Image: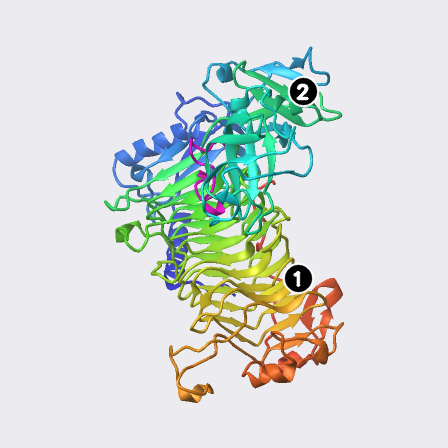
């Protein structure tokens, strides 16, 4: 059963009531079709408009005659609707609860707001065997550039070196960049002879992409010192050029290299000549192939004014598709923000209330899919399919604790969506990123095949005040993420103080990272006052549950299983309780049970003599009890609990009522973690976890998908 905030329930009831009223009233109707005309009346199916913008204007004109007394439906036939810039909706485009405005597809049809442009005129290249070439005059004129290309609906790869794997930073000419704080800006590195060539065509257009720590830095070349093999970039990267906190050189690739164009499926754009080169895959006929490059930066912009209380309200987009966006990092931005947080979206909302996107598909993006900015409240994003996004699926970010109160963003629903293959261009992007926002429900989403975190909550590092609170992360299925590319990531990642936030009933598995990380649930810097319960986490590279440093997090009734290198980990022992670890099952066959720093230390915060601590100060920095641990390959006397034997561990006050026994899963080898009736976990108060409902309830995407 999905638990919702009071505001969400009230909003849902209002919608149902409004829908019931609307169902009894014939709506105003407008029609749009690819073969329509914006000079037509648009009021009948046989005289449709041609564009979404024209239909929006018709609704505006209708509203200008007085307040809407009936709902409005704009019906769009299937087919492509090309755009070069986003369609903008303002407060004047709002509906009401009793008369909402709906932009929807005809049943079973697939209208696509198409932000790409088809490239034609292909011919074999006379100089490069196997390659085809097309002239793109807008590129030569400096009016267009793009970093993505799609052939027959599938993304193709820019010519790059190396073809597989990575190159390695060989040295650090700036000296301190190897050993100082990892956040030090660095602008050059030493490369191995031959890895970077100053003779490459259009060196200004060559892009070096460095994968280090939890970011991907995108760096245009400024100069190359061929004597010292040092490359210097036009702007700095925000972190040192090591893989992580070691002194090992970072991995990198070099893209958009004409001389590397030599394999089927690769392409290269020469901006000076306006020539686009492509080597077809076997069986591709360039006379028939649909080659598309993105041109529009966004599809939809909803622009309200929250401070002056002029929102955009009660607009719904249903069963629609949005494809292709084109975006480039601005000069000086190397994409060093955590979570690729500076990358915008195809659909952007500001000052939106009671708006919705239902059963839509957003795909083939050079950006993120959805972005909710300041003053967005009570909006719904349900049953959508987000596929092949250059960055993330959703980014929610409003005013912070010192901002105008009307800029706060929260109480939105992101539920039953399918987000797959995100981070295609910016791998550090997050599936669903909640920054400065509160009271949101993120539920029943399927998130997979990204290169970084699945769901991230909070945007303050440390224990200072934060407005991130009361967010509910429930019944999501997060799997096959990380994929070994970046470090320091998790399926669900938290930051900062977040009272009332609940993470429950999520199914998490197959989380991998580069060197370190690849955790299941990760409480990072200052995560405080969260409840983590009823989650099933397995097949993680590192711990199923990890704390960097945190305060008073309740972790109860979860299953953490089959961590490859760790099961539970913590980085810091601080003078307070970091977590209450109770009624959990930990099952493993390899790796360390308790890794990192699980020491206690004296502190006086909230000391009570009855707590069991002796002396004038408390000592426990975490509590653990009523848990069930088991490794089928080890006897209890072979297991170490923070380097202590079981009896010694219990004498410290930990796990006094816990047990070491087989939990009797239905089939652990097949990852079926249902418990048999005779499981010893029940005697410890463990309650069965049903993850069968994790992920979307019902179909996602437009009808006819």
- 342 magenta-colored: yes
What residue does disc 2 label?
Answer: 288
Which residue is pictured at 63% across the width and 19% down the height? Answer: 277
Instruction: Tell whether 6 sits left or right of 363.
Output: left
The answer to whether residue 388 shows anywhere in this view is no
Query: Which range is magenta?
Result: 325-346
> For the point 26% across and 51% down, which residue is it?
404
Compared with residue 349, is residue 50 higher up or lower down, i.e. above or below? above
Q: Is residue 580 above or below residue 350?
A: below
Closer to the camera, 93 or 26? 93
Looking at the rendered structure, the secondary structure element under dot 1 is: loop
Q: Nearer the viewer, mark 1 or mark 2?
A: 1
Image location of residue 364, percent across then percent down: 56, 35
Residue that carries the numbered disc 1 in the rendered image = 565
Q: Earlier in the sequence, mark 1 or mark 2?
A: 2
Residue 147 appears anywhere in the view: yes
Residue in the foreground of this view, choosing between 226 and 117: 226
Q: Position of residue 509 (x, y in %)?
A: 64, 58
């Amino acid at each position: 059963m999905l638990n919702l905030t009071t505001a969400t329930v009230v909003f849902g009831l209002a919608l149902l009531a409004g829908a019931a009223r609307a169902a009894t009233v014939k709506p105003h109707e407008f029609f749009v079709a690819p073969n329509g005309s914006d000079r037509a009346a648009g009021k009948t199916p046989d005289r449709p408009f041609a564009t979404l913008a024209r239909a929006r204007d018709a609704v505006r004109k209708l509203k200008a005659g007085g307040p809407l007394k009936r709902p409005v439906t704009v019906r769009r036939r299937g087919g492509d609707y090309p755009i070069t810039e986003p369609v903008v909706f303002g407060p004047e485009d709002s509906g009401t609860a009793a008369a909402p405005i709906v932009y929807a597809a005809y049943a079973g049809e697939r209208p696509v707001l198409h932000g790409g442009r088809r490239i034609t005129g292909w011919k074999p290249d006379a100089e490069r065997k196997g390659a085809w070439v097309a002239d793109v005059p807008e590129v030569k004129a400096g009016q267009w550039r793009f970093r993505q290309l799609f052939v027959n609906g599938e993304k193709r790869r820019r010519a790059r070196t190396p073809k597989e794997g990575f190159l390695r930073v060989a040295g650090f000419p700036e000296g301190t960049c190897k050993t100082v704080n990892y956040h030090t800006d660095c602008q050059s590195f030493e490369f191995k002879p031959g890895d970077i060539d100053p003779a490459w065509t259009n060196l200004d257009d060559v892009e070096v992409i460095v994968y280090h720590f939890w970011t991907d830095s995108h760096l245009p070349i400024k100069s190359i010192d061929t004597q010292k093999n040092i490359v210097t970039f036009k702007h700095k990267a925000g972190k040192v050029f090591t893989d992580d906190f070691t002194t090992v050189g970072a991995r990198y690739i070099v893209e958009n290299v004409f001389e590397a164009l030599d394999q089927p499926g690769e392409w290269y754009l020469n901006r000076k000549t306006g020539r686009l080169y492509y080597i077809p895959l076997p069986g591709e006929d360039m006379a028939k192939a649909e080659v598309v490059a993105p041109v529009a930066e966004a599809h939809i912009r909803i622009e309200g004014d929250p401070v002056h209380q002029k929102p955009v309200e009660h607009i719904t987009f249903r069963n629609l598709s949005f494809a292709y966006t084109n975006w480039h990092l601005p000069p000086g931005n190397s994409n060093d923000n955590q979570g690729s947080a500076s990358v915008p979206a195809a659909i952007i909302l500001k000052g939106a209330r009671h708006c919705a996107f239902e059963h839509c598909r957003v795909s083939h993006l050079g950006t993120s899919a959805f972005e909710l900015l300041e003053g967005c409240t009570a909006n719904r994003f349900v049953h959508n399919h987000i596929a092949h996004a250059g960055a993330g699926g959703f980014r929610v970010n409003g005013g912070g604790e010192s901002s105008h109160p009307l800029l706060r963003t929260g109480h939105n629903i992101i539920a039953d969506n399918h987000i797959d293959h995100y981070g295609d261009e910016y791998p550090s992007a997050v599936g669903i990123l909640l920054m400065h926002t509160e009271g949101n429900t993120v539920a029943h989403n399927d998130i997979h095949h990204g290169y970084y975190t699945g769901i991230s909550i909070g945007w303050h590092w440390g224990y200072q005040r934060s407005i991130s609170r009361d967010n509910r992360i429930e019944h999501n299925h997060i799997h096959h993420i990380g994929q070994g590319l970046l470090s320091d990531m998790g399926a669900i990642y938290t930051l900062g103080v977040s009272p009332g936030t609940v993470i429950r009933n999520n199914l998490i598995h197959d989380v991998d990272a580069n060197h370190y990380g690849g955790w299941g649930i990760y409480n990072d810097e200052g995560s405080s006052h969260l409840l983590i319960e009823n989650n099933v986490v397995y097949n993680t590279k590192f711990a199923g549950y990890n704390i960097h440093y945190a305060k008073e997090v309740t972790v109860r009734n979860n299953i953490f299983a089959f961590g490859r290198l760790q099961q539970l980990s913590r980085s810091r022992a601080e003078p307070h309780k970091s977590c209450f670890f109770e009624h959990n099952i930990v099952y493993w066959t390899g790796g360390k049970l308790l890794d990192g720093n699980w020491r206690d230390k004296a502190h006086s915060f909230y000391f009570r003599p009855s707590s069991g601590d002796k002396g004038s100060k408390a000592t426990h920095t975490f509590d653990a009890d009523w848990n069930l641990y088991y490794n089928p390959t080890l006897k209890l006397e072979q297991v170490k609990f923070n380097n202590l034997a079981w009896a010694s561990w219990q004498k410290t006050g930990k796990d006094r009522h816990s047990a070491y026994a087989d939990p009797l899963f239905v089939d652990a080898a097949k990852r079926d973690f249902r418990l048999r009736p005779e499981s010893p976990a029940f005697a410890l108060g463990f309650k069965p976890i049903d993850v069968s409902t994790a992920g979307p309830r019902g179909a996602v995407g437009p009808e006819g998908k």
